[in-house]
Amino acid sequence: MDDRELLELLTRRDERGADELLRRYGLMLRYIIAPILSDPREREECLSDVVLRAWDRAGQYDPARGGFAAWLSAVARNTARNRLRAGGADRETGELDPTAPDPAPGPEELVLREERARRLREVIQSLSGTDRQLFYRKYYYLQPTAQMAAELGLTQRAVEGRLRRLRLRLRKELGGERDV
Amino acid sequence: MSDDREFDRMLEDELSALPPPDGAVREVTPWRRAMGRVVWGIGLTTVTVSALWLDYILPAVGTALLVLGFRTLRRENRWLTACWALSLWDAALFFLGCVWDSTVWPDPPFALGWAGRLIRLALAFCLWRGVRAVRRAAGQPPKAGAAGALTLFLAVLCLPTLLTGAEVRLTGLLLVLPILVLYLCILRCLARLPALLDGVGYTVHAAPVRLPDGAVKALWAAALVAGVLLAGALFCRYPMEWAPVEAGEQAGLEEVRGDLLALGMPEQVLDDLAPDDLAGLDGALSVTVRATEEFFSGAPMTREEQLLLTNVAVELPGGHWRIIHHFLWQTDPGLRTTECVKLWPITEERLGGWRAEEEFTGRLLYDWQGTTYTGHYYRISKEHYTSNTAFWGETQNSDVFAVFSLPARGENCRGYLIYGAELVEEGWLLNSWSNYTHQVRWLNYPAMTAMEFDMSGIWGSECTFYTAQSAIQFLPQEE
């Protein structure tokens, strides 16, 4: 079964789709989730969330924007990160502050975000092969230094040094602060 | 630090809307990079392209890729650990072979090549088992057909050598072509292995490293270059023994010497003759001399080394002759690696009228700080060999070679070869040739000796060696 057939099953909400999704991409999804969530139980729950989201949102997948594996990895990464943040917020405050301002961005901030995203895309494209890999592993997949070092054939110290230089460069080119 | 953390969080947030492209997603795996290196390593270490040193460069790259690939996978299972150990052994053997090839020693022992082949076979077997184990651990059916096919292929190729106990070279298009096609098919299947295992590869845990990949590559390249240069510099010459010439060694032979001088023997040649060789010329009836000067032009082309070649035929009573081929470097010889003098004596089998009398002998001399030193040739022997030249094609030859190295320092480097012949039938030409081969360009890898160059039949102005020919030819009755 290829990705197209798998998508058809998911879109039709056929139960075999979820099984096939786990069979084909389960190991990849676990690989993506593992560095973000440390608790094994939470990882399993997150994996279930990812499958559920893929099941629900398979119709939103647009092949023109990238491969199915890339879309699925984005779903897994964002789901795991949301769980991480939700868990962190719970631990910090226990409950939501009713007096907190509305987190939804205003029109001006939306324009600024667009501009920042464009600049970030340009910076990513200008990175060397290894730096781009490090960038995605660090900031997108949230992998720990030891994992990055082992998989890229570098020492942890070398990875830390490269990341430091990378951060300096990004700060210089992106302005450094969210609202600048 | 908190500022950095804030910046990192901001990037993490923004990247939620900027997922990596497909290519970047495929790269983020612990398996693909390592397996890609292993597959490339296997391909590069088994394919031989004999041009522009690619038969060394490609396997060197392949060996490094194998080591790096298995280094990442070494802690996954015991089979892949074995692959890592075997790849290190393979690298050590490759290093030894490269260094060996930069010396003028004979070919490396058969066991060395055989060990290398067995290591490759064992490595293919362990890779097959290792990939199966990875798949099994990931809950997939344990199969790795390409690696298994490679193991079988290498085992079959080892069989002839195993059965005969000697190196067996496959020749003939009908035999080699199917094997090559089969091998390419296996490599093609192997190339698909990393992609095929992408699913299960996510379970692999990459092993940490103490030296970054870049440092390993740089060290490997530096070790190879240093090893080859060092061994090439230290072992590019024959071991020679030199001793000062004894004062008055020609004492008691003044009369013979005087007679030969009167008959026209060059004084330099006379001075260089060993007492026994000089004594053998007692009673000479005539002396015929042919001398030529040869220029060895190497790189840079402005430098020229001048060699004086003097060929002397001495007639003795009863139809006996002594032929002397003498050489003298009139300038610095330049590169002092290996030299060879090949003789085409008058007693060659295809010529008639002459019968060989005495063995080929001679000696070498040079001057250093007012003292003259002498030494024996490293070897004087008759060699049977096959050469392949543009002019004559493949020919079987049998020639006398005198091989030696000039002293590392010293001037007026010189020497001679002498042999005896008897004229058994009148009317035959006295026709004796010497071919002096000298290295003129420093780049000589894999190292070839002057004798090997001469035997190879290679010819051209851009060669590492240059051969100067000189001869003495005349009809004895006419001189």
Image: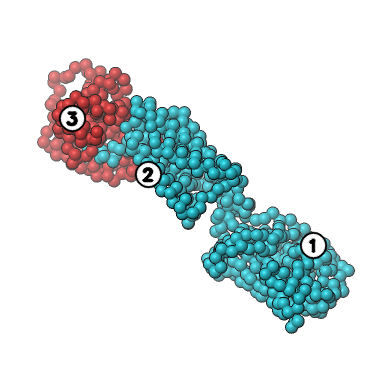
Chain colours: A red, B cyan
Distance between the alpha carbons at the discs numbered 1 and 3: 97 Å
Label count reads: 3
Q: Residues within 10 Å of mark 3 (few under 14, many from 20)?
A: some
Q: Quadrant of residue A128?
A: top left
Q: Chain of mark 3?
A: A
Residue identified by numbered label 2 = B188
Q: Residue B265: where, in percent of width, then height?
A: 77, 76
Q: The residue under label 1 is which amino acid type?
A: Val
Distance between the alpha carbons at the discs numbered 2 and 3: 33 Å
Q: Residue B408: where, in percent of width, then height?
A: 67, 58
Q: Residue B208: where, in percent of width, then height?
A: 43, 32
Q: Is residue A16 left or right of residue A150?
A: left
Q: Which mark is residue A9?
A: 3
Q: SS for tag 1?
A: loop
Q: Quadrant of residue A119?
A: top left
In this rendering, does residue B316 appear at all?
Answer: yes
Q: Are marks 1 and 2 in contact (CB under 8 Å)?
A: no
- Seen from the viewer's position, the closer of residues A68 and B254 is A68
Q: Residues within 10 Å of mark 1 (few under 14, many from 20)?
A: some
Q: SS for tag 2?
A: helix
Q: Chain of mark 2?
A: B
Q: Chain of mark 1?
A: B
Q: From what the image shows, is residue B15 above or below residue B271?
A: above
